Image (cartoon, rainbow, N blue to C red):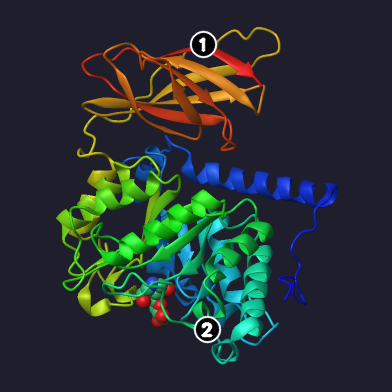
Amino acid sequence: MTERCQGDTRPRTGPRARTAIVLAAAALLAATSAAFLPGTASAGTTLGASAAEKGRYFGTAVAASRLSDGNYTTILNREFNSVTPENEMKIDATEPQQGRFSYGAAEQIVNHARSRGMSVRGHTLAWHSQQPSWMESMSGSALRSAMLNHVTQVATHFRGQVVAWDVVNEAFEDGTSGARRNSNLQRTGNDWIEAAFRAARAADPGAKLCYNDYNTDNWTHAKTQAVYNMVRDFKSRGVPIDCVGFQSHFNNDSPYVSNYRTTLSSFAALGVDVQVTELDIQGAPAATYRSVVEDCLAVARCNGVTVWGIRDSDSWRASQTPLLFNSSGQKKAAYDAVLAALNNGTTPTDPPTTPPTTPPTTPPSGSCTATLQDSTRWGDRFNSQVTVSGASNWTVVVAVTPPQKVSNTWNGSPTWDSSGNVMTMRSNGSGNVFGFTTMANGTWTRPVVRSCTAS
Ligand code: 9MR
């Protein structure tokens, strides 16, 4: 049976389709880089701005039905720069009857987020749960076609508006078997997951495509290892997977463990991004929240953290009070711990510096201009922001003064000379402003832009 189904609107190849894809990708990247821009006015005082200083996002699950609650939206708009619809993009919501798609509630969230510069994680295209009854009763090749058509239609509808999709959710068994979950989707054939990823890539080439699951936090667990082996296999065979989501619903039965960082970094080493996608912790212990955020920040490919709701009363596990805000919308101790972790251990006592801007480098002809500005400064390190003009594909060389070391970068692809003091940063489609953190190691000399070359 062919994988191109009735109603399939995957883009055909050809110059027009390619132009549309490029435009959509450019719009997406513009929105993404806006959300990730470091150095915003409230950096250090809200979750999203502090995460952006580290080149990450801080997100929350959002329910469309709560967008009319002023207390809820005040916190949402103030604190978060990424949003995941909690239920509104699931299969039962978006295709309640076969072939009849319904996007109203999802669009309400997407519009709320994007109009305020927040990015959107899409959740989820293929899942054994929250299937509409028509899909629950299907099997075999008919179900396979229906699933692929669903992936194609929904990813196409939101093309350019969703930064990352949870393409497939929760496809592995709990326990020690390491097996795939026995679901109607699994029974269509073991290749259903990769088929879903291929359909999603074709429908929205600009979105990061994630596999998302729970109880995959403990590196020693069979389920974690099983997902790891699948991702390694996908990468080796060119299946289009870009990221792995760790739901991270921690409670007394499934606690946070200190090898969580090993889990994140081990997956990242396979060549995928990692994201904490549904974080909540029973009782919201501040120290555990802090550890999770520190673990993400310690892994360069950990893009950000999403908590699964704003106030305790918004949580699917409200009685466990697992979130960062109490039911009245007051910040809890866990909030302060997360903010401190995002600000890297200290709530900065130095006000963000507003230093002079270095004069632009004088560009030789055919090149570009790169302007370096200081950004936030802490007790041990500081951020710098470089704005490039005159080219969209650029290469900027920046030098720091030994014993300074660059510890983190965002919105560019860095390489280093053998001394480790000269960084060559290349555009990676994230816009014309990149940033980096320099560990001072006692020396506070401003980094120097050596050259800017258009390529
Ligand atoms: O938070 C969601 C809750 O409102 C729904 O009733 C529930 C139904 O399955 O799904 C919850 O979100 C789940 C997410 O989609 C996938 N990971 C587990 C989440 C908590 O159950």
User: Which of the 4 image quarters holds residue 172?
Assistant: bottom left
Q: Residue at horizontal 58%, vertical 35%?
A: 431
Q: Residues within 10 Å of mark 2 (few under 14, many from 20)?
A: some
Q: Is tag 1's residue or tag 2's residue first in the polypeptide sequence?
A: 2
Q: Residue at horizontal 37%, vertical 50%?
A: 267
From the image, which quarter does the N terminus lie in? bottom right
Q: Position of residue 449 (x, y in %)?
A: 48, 13
Q: Residue at horizontal 60%, vertical 68%?
A: 107
Query: Does 235 sit left or right of 317 as displayed?
Result: right
The residue indicated by pointer 1 is: 359
Above or below: residue 149 compared with residue 455: below
Q: Position of residue 35 (x, y in %)?
A: 50, 46
Q: Residue at horizontal 28%, vertical 60%?
A: 217
Q: Secondary structure at mark 1?
A: loop
> Number of marks in the image?
2
Depth check: 49 or 244 in front?
Answer: 244
Query: Does 153 sit left or right of 115 as displayed?
Result: right
Q: Residue 75, can we see it? A: no
Q: Position of residue 78 (x, y in %)?
A: 40, 54
Q: Secondary structure at mark 2?
A: loop
Which disc number belongs to residue 131? 2
Which of discs 1 and 2 lies nearer the camera? The answer is 2
Q: Quadrant of ligand 1?
A: bottom left
